[in-house]
């Protein structure tokens, strides 16, 4: 049942995504992409559980690697997006 | 136990909502910064509540990893030049893919008994993650010119690709059936990395905006697959938002080049069609001094930038010229083609950096509707996106591509280094039109020259 429920979430999220992102103007497409980079860093929350467990050493180290990489995405992505958006000014 | 996990999941719902609101605010430049902040708050919240989970036994490794990642991310974000944004986004796509790969791999080697479905999605996350990673590295190398931009093709490439895909599917079956055999893991990862490389090398430099958008989408899909592996709904929501975003951008880029995605992805394999059409007319050069007199009398000016403007770093000088033109009473707008630059929206960021207001940046359709009323069109470092062959020369490789109709303005100035063709390698009849004048030389110097004339 979990699978079906997760698939429901997937389908709904994809449709929400399409509707929202269609409305982003062309001017903001670069910040949109770097912001998307940051959001795809959501893998951190998966990596945190793996890096914090001691079930199997190899898995823990892989979790730590994933955590470093995903944190780069999150921190770098949000900061660079903010840097860009701060430059968009009205006359 | 139940209370904590219930609380965590409740907070996940809240952060998913904030992600969605964040993207909604990205719908307008005036609210976009707030949207990004909202999305960052959502992420922060999600990480903090995950730390409460009972599954976490030690925090040292988590702390060190987050610190290391934050430092790297911080410096990457602060140091990058705006011209290098496509490279940075490519690298971020790559790290996102690699993170999902590592999560899926960790699940496979964790020793836990996994169901067939979990094994299948683990393999999927592993595969998409690896393809995204190696593909993004190649895209980065091409964008930063560490690798030749032209398509790399060799004999038997198509056959090899098909063989690789069949091998990857076989590995999927093997991993699902014998999940604890380490050899299968290594072969699967190696295969997926090779597929990522093979997917990007036949794509030329001009098509990079499509490739980055597509890899952006893949990095989201990889996170989404990792969400299925961990049965984590927030990963699925966030991953699919990113996946959807990348797909929409890919689609916009393809439309702007009048091509299908399949056509872009296999472009290296196609024979280049050369049109034998003769372009009539002659090229007329003009000096910046003469151009000044025309600009001084102009009531309205439209600037059409391309990647060449970024290369020459001419956007700041252009902004100075814009200021002087406006003081002289002229209206100045910028016309941005969707594929100008090397990633979606790249030109807009570069102009925003030079302090040009976003209200002056207009999209192709807006400007084409009234381009014939403009006294002067200044084309800076753009070529294919203003090529009238797309409109009037059947048989031209770019025929049918939507372009900015610069040639319909009363006067056209083309700022260009020399007579080289654009990325697509096609002659541009715009340069031969009666109302076109070529101003040869470095764009920044030419604009600086005009600025001096106005100031004196």
Image: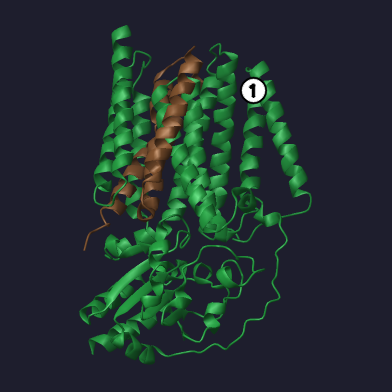
Chain colours: A brown, B green
Question: For residue B115, what is the image quadrant?
Answer: top right
Q: Position of residue B311 (x, y in %)?
A: 44, 69
Residue displayed at 44% across by 42% down: B245
A50 shown above or below A78: above
In depth, the one of B375 and B126 nearer the eye is B375
Q: Position of residue B404 (x, y in %)?
A: 46, 68
For residue B225, side relative to residue A13 (left or right): right
Q: Position of residue B234 (x, y in %)?
A: 39, 26
Residue displayed at 47% across by 45% down: B248
Question: For residue B272, what is the image quadrant?
Answer: bottom right
Q: Position of residue A13 (x, y in %)?
A: 42, 30
The residue most toward the top is: B1
Badge 1: chain ID? B
* Residue at which label 1 appears: B182
Question: For residue B296, what is the image quadrant?
Answer: bottom left
Question: Which quadrant holds the C terminus of chain B?
Answer: bottom left
Disc 1 is placed on an element classified as helix
The answer to whether residue A63 of the structure is visible from this angle is no
């Amino acid at each position: 049942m979990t699978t079906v429920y997760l698939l429901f979430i997937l389908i709904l999220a994809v449709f929400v995504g399409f509707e929202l992102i269609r409305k982003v103007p062309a001017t903001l497409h670069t910040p949109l992409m770097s912001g998307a980079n940051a959001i795809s860093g959501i893998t951190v929350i998966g990596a945190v559980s793996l890096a914090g467990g001691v079930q199997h050493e190899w898995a823990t180290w892989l979790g730590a690697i994933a955590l470093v990489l995903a944190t780069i995405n999150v921190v770098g992505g949000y900061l660079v997006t903010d840097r860009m958006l701060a430059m968009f000014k009205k006359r | 136990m139940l209370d904590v996990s219930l609380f965590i999941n409740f907070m996940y719902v809240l952060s998913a909502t904030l992600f969605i609101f964040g993207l909604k605010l990205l719908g307008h430049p005036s609210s976009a910064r707030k949207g990004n902040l909202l999305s960052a708050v959502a992420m922060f919240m999600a990480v903090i509540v995950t730390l409460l989970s009972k599954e976490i036994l030690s925090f040292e490794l988590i702390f060190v990893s987050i610190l290391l990642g934050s430092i790297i991310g911080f410096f990457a974000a602060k140091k990058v030049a705006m011209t290098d944004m496509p490279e940075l986004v490519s690298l971020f796509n790559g790290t996102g893919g690699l993170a999902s790969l590592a999560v899926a791999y960790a699940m496979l080697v964790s020793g836990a008994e996994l169901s067939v479905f979990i094994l299948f999605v683990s393999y999927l996350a592993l595969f998409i993650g690896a393809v995204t990673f190696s593909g993004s590295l190649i895209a980065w190398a091409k964008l930063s010119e560490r690798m030749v931009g032209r398509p790399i093709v060799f004999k038997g490439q198509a056959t090899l690709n098909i063989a690789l895909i069949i091998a990857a599917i076989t590995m999927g079956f093997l991993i699902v059936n014998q999940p604890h055999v380490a050899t299968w893991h290594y072969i699967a990862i190696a295969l997926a990395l090779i597929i990522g490389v093979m997917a990007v090398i036949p794509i030329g430099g001009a098509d990079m905006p499509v490739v980055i958008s597509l890899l952006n989408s893949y990095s989201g899909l990889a996170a989404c697959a990792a969400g299925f592996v961990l049965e984590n709904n927030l990963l699925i929501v966030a991953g699919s938002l990113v996946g959807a975003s990348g797909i929409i951008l890919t689609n916009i880029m393809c439309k702007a080049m009048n091509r299908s995605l399949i056509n872009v992805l296999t472009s290296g394999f196609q024979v280049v069609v050369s049109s034998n059409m003769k372009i009539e007319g002659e090229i007329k050069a003009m000096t910046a001094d003469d151009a000044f007199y025309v600009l001084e009398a102009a009531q309205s000016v439209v600037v059409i930038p391309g990647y060449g403007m970024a290369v020459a770093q001419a956007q700041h000088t252009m902004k100075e010229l814009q200021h002087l033109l406006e003081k002289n009473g002229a209206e100045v707008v910028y016309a941005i083609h969707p594929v100008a630059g090397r990633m979606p929206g790249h030109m807009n960021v570069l102009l925003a950096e030079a302090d040009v207001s976003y209200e002056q940046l207009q999209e192709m359709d807006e400007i084409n509707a009234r381009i014939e009323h403009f006294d002067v069109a200044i084309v800076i470092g753009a070529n294919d996106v203003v090529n009238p062959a797309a409109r009037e020369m059947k048989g031209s490789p770019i025929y049918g591509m939507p372009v900015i109709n610069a040639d319909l303005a009363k006067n056209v100035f083309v700022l260009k280094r020399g007579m080289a063709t654009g990325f697509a390698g096609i002659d541009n009849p715009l340069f031969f039109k009666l109302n076109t004048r070529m101003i040869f030389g470095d764009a920044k110097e030419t604009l600086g020259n005009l600025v001096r004339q106005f100031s004196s």
